[in-house]
Amino acid sequence: MTRLEGKVAVITGATGGIGSAAARLFASEGASVALVDLDESALRDVVRSIGEDKASYTAADVTDPEQTEAYIDAAADRWGGIDILLANAGIEGTLSPITDYPVDEFDRVMAVNVRGVWLGIKYAVPAMREGGGGSIVITSSTAGIGGSPEMSAYNTSKHAVIGLMRCAALECAPLGIRVNTVNPAPIETRMMRSIEEMRVAAMDDTRVTVGVTKQSIAEGIPLQRYGDPEEVARMMLFLSSDDSSFCTGGVYMVDGGRSAGNPYRN
Ligand code: NAD
């Protein structure tokens, strides 16, 4: 298929579960993909699996303005412009009530999940404008539309990027740049393994009130399972391609029905 033929996509968090699935899917649909993440050898592996004729990488920390400018410039130089930004890098933070939540950990989550997305938009928009438009897709979460006990930093950050998306969608509409969020429920990646470990450990921790297993998390999803990274990537593909040409400013759930009910937990 060639839904992204001739397009250039910058993907952050590109060695993670969802980012690497999107990188492979976008490349298979004809895009050139510029991958961004922290670890160079992991980036090299993903590029190799896609092919150097379709993929490039820049090791960068999305919280850093200079490194953000550098990964955008490197993508535009390598592929001749930028059409798509998938602002996907994210961290889960720790599990703790607000009263015990470490302040530096709160700042770290907000830096990666919010500042990182804002910086990506800040530096990608001028490059996209030069090319006559484009699409920005931000990975939010079901945690962006509801609360979860002991995950205040993560849920706050995922709500914040919906506000950011709405502002960017309004600012960028006259430039022909669409901006949307994708909001997954639990997906089979490293991040959920980490959250499960913290939740299971919490069952013996009196400070934390919500201890749950993977099974009980999955049972809270009407389809009774986690999603696969590729099921999220397919929504990202839709929003990145011209198939979604009239979609901007929207929140797109990929959640097995979870947002149809309560509670919205990770
Ligand atoms: P993941 O941990 O596999 O991938 C996240 C990637 O982001 C990692 O490769 C990590 O190295 C990268 N990253 C972290 N900090 C970075 C930084 N400062 N600079 C550059 N890269 C950085 O997890 P994932 O599930 O693939 O997560 C991708 C996105 O999806 C995240 O934004 C996450 O919050 C969101 N999300 C995940 C789930 C889920 O259940 N897995 C559900 C909803 C939303």
Image (cartoon, rainbow, N blue to C red):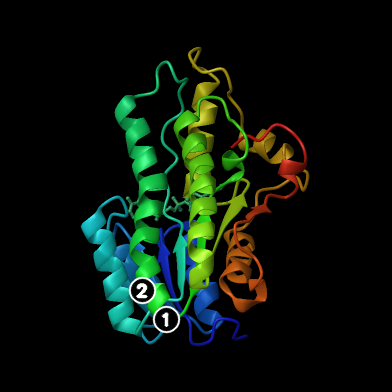
Residue furthest to the front: 174
Left or right relative to 31: residue 216: right
Give the residue furthest to the left.
66
Residue 127, numbered circle: 2
Instruction: Write down the quadrant of residue 265 in the picture.
Output: top right
- The location of residue 239, given as percent across then percent down, is 60, 67
The kind of residue tagged 1 is Gly
The local secondary structure at tag 2 comes to: helix
Q: Which residue is mark 1?
A: 131
Q: Residue at x 24, y 66 (%)?
A: 70
> Is residue 232 found left or right of 74 in the rendered image?
right
Label 1 environment density (alpha carbons within 10 Å; few <14, some 14–19, many ≥20): some
Q: Is residue 214 visible?
A: yes
Tell me if residue 182 comes above or below residue 159 in the rendering: below
* Residue 76 lies in quadrant: bottom left
**Residue 171 screen position, x and y as percent:** 48, 59
Ligand 1 within 8 angstroms of badge 2 C-beta:
no
Asked if the residue at tag 2 contacts the one at tag 1, i.e. Cβ–Cβ closer than 8 Å, the answer is yes
Relative to residue 253, is residue 177 depicted above or below?
A: below
Tell me the kind of residue under disc 2: Ala
Q: Position of residue 119 (x, y in %)?
A: 34, 55
Residue 83, given in percent of the width and then of the height, sits at 46, 76
Q: Mark 2, residues whose alpha carbon is within 10 Å: few (<14), some, or many (≥20)? A: many
Residue that appears at 62% across and 43% down: 142
Label 1 CB sits under 8 Å from any ligand 1 atom: no
Quadrant where the C terminus sits is: top right
Q: Quadrant of the N terminus?
A: bottom right
Q: What element does badge 1 sit on?
A: loop
Relative to 7, residue 105 above or below: above
